[in-house]
Image: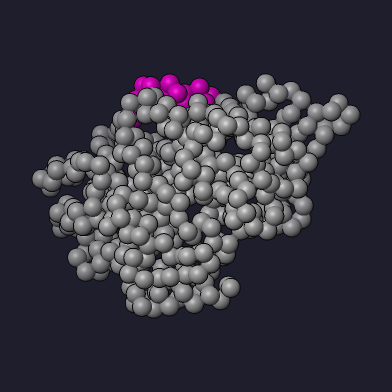
Amino acid sequence: MRTRTSASVAAVAGLLALPLALTGCSAFGVGDDGGDDGKVTLTFQSLAYQDTTIAATQEIVDAWNEANPDVQVELVQGSWDNVHDQLVTQFQGGTAPDIIHDESADIMGFAEQGYLADLSDYLSDDTKSAVSDDIWGTVTASDGSIVAAPTLLQSYVVFANTDAFADAGVELPTGDSLAWDDFQALAGQVAGDGFGLGWGLQQPTAAVMNLSLGFDGTYFDGDAINVGANELAVPERIHAMAYEDGSLDPVSLTQSGSDVLPGFFDGKYPMYVAGNYIAQQITESAPEGFNWAVLPPLAGTAGAVQAANPQTMSVAAESEHVEESAAFIDFFMQADHQAALAQGDWLIPSSTAARDLVAEQTAGENGWDAILASGEGLSAAPFQSAVNYPQWKDQYATPALQQYLADEITAEQLTTQLTDGWNSLG
């Protein structure tokens, strides 16, 4: 089994010894003044779920609390599974945490409704200059206010079983990118008597939307939807691999990424597509002697471009301590903190300094060179600014894409469902 480099282990080993218990409560409000002593307590709802990242988050909070005895941060655990609905309830009920962990595609609707504080005047110049303008664009509202700090980025990457490639007599591709045509051809070459690729697309919308940018598939122009050839390029190619050339297992399209992972381990699928965070599960769960690599970033007609949908740190507008909350976010954004979090989740830091630190600490091994390279093509996408995107994604896009990838509807019917669904929300 491939493991972290010793440098990478050193960067996170200290985190794993920390206690993982988090303070939890079913309802909590914005920070209070903590009584007559003048101390401020801020609530920070974190969505970290892998043990390594939970530990890294806890260490950052502990370091802040030690250095700032008068402004304490209380960590509470949230979940990616229900964060949107939970925030709706919290904002409407006046019980939102001071500091909110989420992602850019989910928060912009809340920002337009006035629920998130403008951090423009609070974040330091160091924090602002460490992140590209394009990434800042994903957390900037229509009025120009910065409603979050972007932290970690996910890309979709192709994992390869290197022994399966060797057995098939197929060389691992190299270079700065992997064209979709070559990717599809590879899946056929390594398939043998089975399938060359497993891809867990039980929840397909994020992957399709993010990867479509590589074909100039934007889906939205402001609040108007457009589903044309560019937008359909990714789902049509996936569909063709499953139902035309047979290189992609159609059953895997109905499963989660974690469900498909055992098939990658046992050689059923020489290739496996997933978010780069799956690398953490591979290092923890792969059988002894399993050898793997991350292939170059997928490239469409527009290049190796994917949508940048960073995890975010925001402050509730109703918080009584916006300045103190923003100061903690500044602390959270420091390069060494972001590098530790990134290595815990195998995600890409938004800041250049943190990416350089991850590259140095990992020496680019265990797939980190390709994972970090995939971050170079991350760009803001129009869907992230579409106010009703979260609702459209859940109610219309996901079920429509599920039907299409199950070969139950045509591409034309997919287009109609996506378009009519969006227009019904107008």
Q: Residue at x 57, y 49 (%)?
A: 140
- Residue 136: within the magenta? no
Position of the N terminus, as image quadrant, is top left
Q: Residue at x 57, y 41 (%)?
A: 149
Considering the whole magenta stretch, tell me its main secondary structure. Answer: helix
Report whether residue 79 is seen. no
- Residue 11: within the magenta? yes
Position of the C terminus, as image quadrant, is bottom right
Q: Quadrant of residue 143?
A: bottom right
Q: Quadrant of residue 110?
A: bottom right
Q: Quadrant of residue 8?
A: top left
Report whether residue 177 is seen. yes
The answer to whether residue 276 is above or below residue 341 is below
Q: Residue at x 40, y 47 (%)?
A: 378
Tell me: 52 left or right of 326: left
- Label count reads 0
Q: In the image, which residues are magenta?
A: 3-17
Tell me: 34 left or right of 180: right
Q: Measuring from the top left, give residue 177's x and y in whole percent.
A: 25, 46
Q: Measuring from the top left, give residue 74's x and y in whole percent.
A: 70, 34
The answer to whether residue 365 is above or below residue 49 is above
Give whichever of 28, 140 is nearer the camera: 140
